[in-house]
């Protein structure tokens, strides 16, 4: 299984390789393992220091999550955070599955742009505020969806940002996974619908992370 994971690394962007090599070693030291997402075996760890960008984006979001003044006009399109908050408040009385669908749809309206073009670096995890102003790449969609659902009252322990390999496009990708009524639902910027992970056959999960844990994935 470890050999298989090392083979997968050669398909990923170079900036992910060194990080994932560390993750493989760390996962071998963990004792909790179970079959799960996309049918792969998940090994859990509590050491989030592997992912400095993740606590950073959570801390920056606390500072950023403030509406921009009175925002009485759309001139210069400068009221994204306030409109996001109004949008989330409009969902509060809807069923959970409808909330997820609308959050997925809302985030997916943003334009896709690579981090190197946006921030001059290969890998940058943006806050919702940065994403709504600057657009972003796949993990930015997933982060905004997770923090949207968190604000709606979802338990963050039931959600994960999943870094994976898209075997159709042969590229690294990221989605949000949400545990819901005995299933795991996938919110994906490449797919307009919210779908069960059981119906997705072209994604190979590498690792996932939430506010409490991270998981390494290996085939059963």
Image (spheres, grey):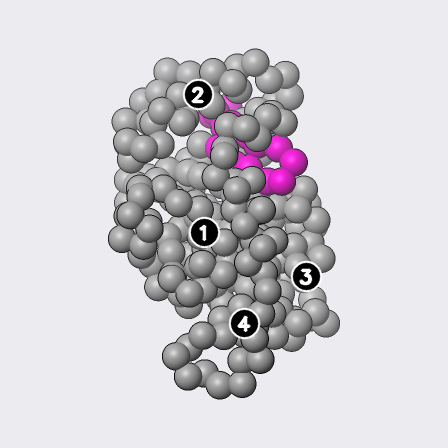
Instruction: Give the x, y percent position of residue 214.
Output: 57, 32
Q: Height in image: 193 above or below 119? A: below
Instruction: Give the x, y percent position of residue 43.
Output: 57, 24
Q: Height in image: 49 above or below 150? A: above
Name the front one of labels 4 and 2: 4
Instruction: Give the x, y percent position of residue 3.
Output: 37, 16
Q: Residues within 10 Å of mark 3 (few under 14, many from 20)?
A: some
Q: Residue at x 39, y 45 (%)?
A: 124
The residue that disc 4 covers is 68
Name the front one of labels 3 and 1: 1
* Separation (CA) of disc 4 from disc 2: 40 Å
- Looking at the rendered structure, the secondary structure element under dot 2 is helix
Q: Earlier in the sequence, mark 4 or mark 1?
A: 4
- Looking at the rendered structure, the secondary structure element under dot 4 is loop
* Separation (CA) of disc 2 from disc 3: 34 Å
Classify residue 13 by image quadrant: top left
Q: Height in image: 131 above or below 177? A: below
User: Contact (CB < 8 A) between labels 4 and 1?
Assistant: no
User: Contact (CB < 8 A) between labels 2 and 1?
Assistant: no
Q: Which residues are magenta?
A: 207-220
Q: Residue at x 42, y 65 (%)?
A: 133
Q: Earlier in the sequence, mark 2 or mark 3?
A: 2
From the viewer's perspective, tell me whether residue 165 is left or right of residue 94. left
The residue that disc 2 covers is 22
The residue that disc 3 covers is 152
């Amino acid at each position: 299984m470890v050999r298989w994971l090392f083979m997968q690394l050669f398909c990923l962007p170079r900036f992910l390789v060194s990080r994932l090599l560390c993750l493989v070693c760390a996962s071998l030291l963990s004792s909790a393992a179970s079959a799960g997402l996309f049918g792969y075996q998940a090994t859990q760890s509590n050491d989030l220091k592997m992912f400095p960008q993740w606590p950073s984006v959570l801390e920056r979001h606390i500072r950023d999550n403030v509406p921009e003044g009175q925002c009485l006009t759309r001139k210069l399109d400068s009221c994204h955070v306030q409109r996001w908050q109004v949008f989330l408040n409009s969902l509060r009385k809807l069923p959970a599955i409808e909330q997820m669908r609308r959050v997925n749809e809302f985030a997916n309206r943003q334009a896709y742009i690579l981090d190197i073009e946006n921030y001059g670096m290969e890998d940058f995890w943006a806050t919702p505020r940065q994403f709504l102003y600057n657009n972003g790449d796949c993990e930015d969609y997933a982060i905004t969806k997770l923090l949207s659902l968190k604000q709606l009252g979802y338990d963050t322990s039931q959600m994960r940002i999943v870094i994976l390999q898209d075997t159709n496009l042969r590229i690294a990708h990221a989605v949000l996974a949400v545990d819901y009524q005995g299933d795991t639902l996938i919110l994906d910027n490449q797919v307009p619908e919210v779908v069960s992970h059981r119906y997705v056959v072209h994604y190979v999960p590498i690792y996932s992370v939430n506010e409490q844990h991270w998981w390494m994935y290996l085939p059963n």
